[in-house]
Amino acid sequence: MYSEVVMDHFANPRNVGVIENPDGVGQVGNAKCGDIMKIYLKIENETIVDVKFQTFGCAAAIASSSMATEMIKGKSVDEALAITNKAVLEALQGLPPAKIHCSLLAEEAIHAAIMDYRLKTGGSVDNIRKCDGCCNACDIEHDHVV
Amino acid sequence: MLPYFTDIYGNPSSVHSIGRDAKRVIDTERAKIAEILGAKPREIFFTASGSEADNWAIKGVAAANRKKGNHIITTSIEHHAVLHTCQYLERQGFEVTYLPVDSYGKVSIEDVEKAVRKDTILISIMHANNEIGTIQPIAEIGELAKSKGIPFHTDAVQTTGTIPVNVKDLNVDMLSLSAHKFHGPKGIGVLYARNGRIGDNLIHGGAQEANKRAGTENIPYIVGMSTALQLAVENMEENRKKVQMLRDDIISFVLNNIDHVRLNGHPTDRLPGNANFSFNYIEGESLLLMLDMKGICASSGSACTSGSLDPSHVLLAIGLSHEVAHGSVRFSLSDENTQEDVDYLKEALPGIVKTLRNISPLYNGRKEGNNHV
């Protein structure tokens, strides 16, 4: 049901943890749906120098978080914003149809964390995506923590 | 079972000798199963599954009694074979009362009595729940149903071969069972019907099963089911004690060694091999997969394993929140499990729970005094 890459990132998730005094934190999803993702960013000169995550959820959710954090590490904030759930999905070699929303959650968690950073630093929040409930997973009950 | 694929392969409906031989086999096995259940042979109807038996019992009675009434009583924690059948009948215009259960998953007899109406044509309540293992007071409900003159069906798929199932002791009019639950073959079951009285046919087109269920009988599977049931019943007390001991070992270990965990289901009135827990702050599918990596097979009430977004209807019915239900896992034991298996589980489980909680923001939030669950 899951690809080898998903199982690897699930069994050995990268970047698990918390960053003390982060420059940006984003949390998406809710416990009722069974998925919560929280991403912490350390940003220097518009570059993501460190990223950590914590996820409550299924294997797909944990693997999506792990992969997404790997993908944005070392990237500029704008580059991180350009990473879509499709890219996360491809990197994971796909997810079962019922689990696609997990990759979306990862994209949203990154955007929420960057939103937090931009709001703190007074930057533009124009190209930051908020959940529009497109995956119909939770009646747009995401509680974005910014 | 094997000779019935190759040597005694006749069609029991045929008149020739190999057909007659096959017919004799069915009659013999039917009588054996009947005796074990405390029934008469003509009260035993072979089906292709426990689900078929449930469907037949409910749809059959509903169709046959439409003029008499259109109200059915069942519970909110039934197997989908019963629940979805009832929902189907609702779409056909029947009214169904889904009785609530208490936090242990028990139905109250008072609730059953209160739900009875003049137009109630059937009560269907499972003997034991497949997820949380809670055993219902079937004999008492049966007595009530009898006093009200309402046919009473029980889904005994989980209990037959595991704990005593006698149709007279249980006061039931109809009872469903499935062979693979007592180490028999998959794809064969029985519907017991008192005095052979059953509603309308579910499957039409042949004179098999006293004209009640068309379809050539699956003789090898009938023999396999009958043999498995006999073995299960012969060793029932011994197996029950052994399995119950292993189950209780798991339950006391988990409750004493892992924090933020609850046992789902009744502490004592439960299936001997069922241990169902909710591990707060983590999600069931992740737990299952990590257990599976260590060679331990369990199942979950989490939505993530079912393809839907809602967790198990049974766990919600006993009052669990969605988030706690998502973190539920069931361990099912049989007489083939050993103390060694249980010790292996006890060694693996705490570490897995710890790993997943370390990843979980909910567990972290709890430590910060922000209790989400």
Image (tube, coloured by chain):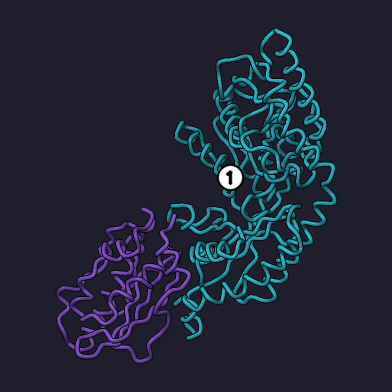
Chain colours: A purple, B cyan
Residue B118 seen anywhere in this rendered image of the structure = no
- Seen as rendered, the residue at the extreme top is B15
Q: Position of residue A121 (x, y in %)?
A: 20, 89
Residue identifier under label 1: B79
Q: Is residue A47 above or below residue B56?
A: below
- Residue at the image position 26 percent from the left and 87 percent from the top: A43
**Is B123 positioned to the left or the right of B227 in the image?**
left
The image quarter containing residue B102 is: bottom right
**Closer to us: B68 or B23:** B23
Q: Position of residue B248 (x, y in %)?
A: 75, 64
- Residue at the image position 24 percent from the left and 66 percent from the top: A84
**Is A107 positioned to the left or the right of B45 in the image?**
left
Numbered marks: total: 1
Q: Is residue B357 above or below residue B344?
A: below
**Closer to us: B86 or A52:** A52
Q: Position of residue B264 (x, y in %)?
A: 63, 62
- Residue at the image position 23 percent from the left and 70 percent from the top: A83
Q: Is residue B248 above or below residue A98?
A: below
Say few, some or many: other residues with alpha carbon within 10 Å of mark 1 (under 14 / 14 to 19 / 20 or more).
many
The image quarter containing residue B187 is: top right
Q: Is residue A82 above or below residue B220?
A: below
Q: Label 1 lies in what chain?
A: B
**Closer to us: B315 or A121:** A121
Q: Which quadrant: the N terminus of chain B? A: top right
User: SS at mark 1?
Assistant: loop
Q: Position of residue B335 (x, y in %)?
A: 76, 52
Residue type, mark 1 in image: His
